[in-house]
Image (cartoon, rainbow, N blue to C red):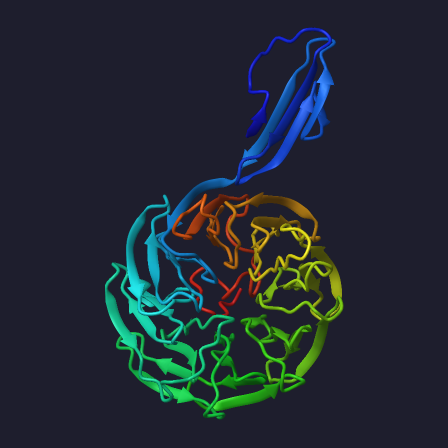
Amino acid sequence: MLGYPETGVTVYQTPDTIGYLYSPKLGNTNFRVTLDGVQVPDSGYFVMNQNHRLTATCENKVIWKLALEKQVYYSCPAVADDGTIYISTGIFRHTDWGTLYAVDPDGVIKWSYDCEYNPYSPVIGREGTVFIQDFHNQVYAVEPDGNLKWKFTEFDKPVHIWYDMGQRIPAVATDGTVYIAADGLYALDPETGDRIWRFNPIYSKCCRQSPVIGPDGTIHIFIHQYDFYAVNPDETQKWHAQLDHEEEMSFACPAIDENGRLYIGAERGLPGFVYCFDSSGVRQWKYLVKGDGRRTVRGSPVIAEDGKIIVATKSGGEEIPAKIIALSPYGTKIWEYIVENFHGPGSADDVYSTPSIGADGMLYFGSETEHFYTLNPDGTLKWKIQLAHGINWSSAAITEDGTLYIGTQALTVEEDPLNGGNLYAIRTESMGYAASPWPRFRQNHKNNGRYNGQ
């Protein structure tokens, strides 16, 4: 707690005017100031006409914070069966390399591995192997001890477009096969890194997002902008669908429900959309994110236990703040939560962070407001905390003991002269994820992008 007067007994004279001012430290919530048991504003004054009791309390949510050498941009933590947390740094076009870290549950770095170019989010495969793709689409397989197992670089089209937005993250099938998006969809052998096959009907085009795997093993991927494919594990095409307009595109990862329906965030310039396709590729509905048509959807959809589809949006500037929107399975809006423009007039405090739905039904997400949010299932705010002046594009992993892990950028010299990043461990009341088909980014905290049958 910051402010004055300090805790303790102070003697004043009658009728002294006593000023006070308090604010919570970073990482604290449920801030409350009381005068003689009655809640009062955070700052103000009172007249000493009798004995008074002034108290200021708050709840610390941060268990630990680990400073990292570079900023954590999109990277979302992956958590292994032994509790090891994997996180990567440096993903942005203005930095030339980044690092994969293995961190123990106490916040101590076990080892690190430097990638040639900026890496995206790590994925944990069978036997604990960590797969990670970098900005040039190269794929690294790293053993649980930090040693490189193999590296894949043999693309059919080595020089292809590297998109600034979105992530390219491997998907891992139940048999261990690793699927990656680059100049098409590749299937790789998890033990050797050898290519099994490549799928790309639009040979010269590249992928803007990551593959996901459905209940029956079908792999789903966007190639180029608005072409959406379902591919069988034997490389054959199952179906092909398209978004409504050739300028529409998706940087987000689809979410899949128990019936194989796919929910996809998309955009066309400034307007944002959410699509629903059934398991045969037939479009069921399309939702326009309203508000002058300027909120785009970069975060990926997730699915609540009751079937609600949850999406986050970017802002459209000062007058059009970002939102969290809950849709019915039929594409109608149930509620929305407005994310304030924390940085003041003219700021664009976007939400790139895909919400994670906890076993307690709460929604957990970060934003460019420097804050981390928890919403009730009805879309009302439960609590929020400021995280060390860093904006947050990462998405949270939640373990069964209620610990939540998320990465941030550290943007101020006062916080970190190297302009580095942080990995946070945050205390929650959620013991893991909601028992829904797709409760977080990439479905589970191994980030494997695979429907797991819940």
Q: Is residue 41 visible?
A: yes
Of 359 and 322, nearer the camera is 322
What quarter of the picture does the N terminus occupy?
top right
Horizontal arrangement in the rendering, residue 159 relative to residue 271 (left or right) = left
Quarter assignment of residue 269: bottom right
Horizontal arrangement in the rendering, residue 32 relative to residue 437 (left or right) = right
Q: With respect to residue 320, does 217 lie above or below?
A: below
Of 62 and 398, nearer the camera is 62
Residue 73: x %, y % from top left: 47, 60
Residue 86: x %, y % from top left: 37, 57
Q: With respect to residue 145, does 235 lie above or below?
A: below
**Residue at (44% x, 69% y) in the render:** 93
**Residue at (54% x, 71% y) in the render:** 253
Quarter assignment of residue 296: bottom right
Q: With respect to residue 196, does 307 lie above or below?
A: above
Residue 99: x %, y % from top left: 34, 61
Horizontal arrangement in the rendering, residue 372 relative to residue 233 (left or right) = right
Q: Is residue 401 visible?
A: no
Residue 53: x %, y % from top left: 66, 16
Residue that sits furthest to the top in the current view: 13
The total number of labels drawn is: 0
Of 62 and 428, nearer the camera is 62
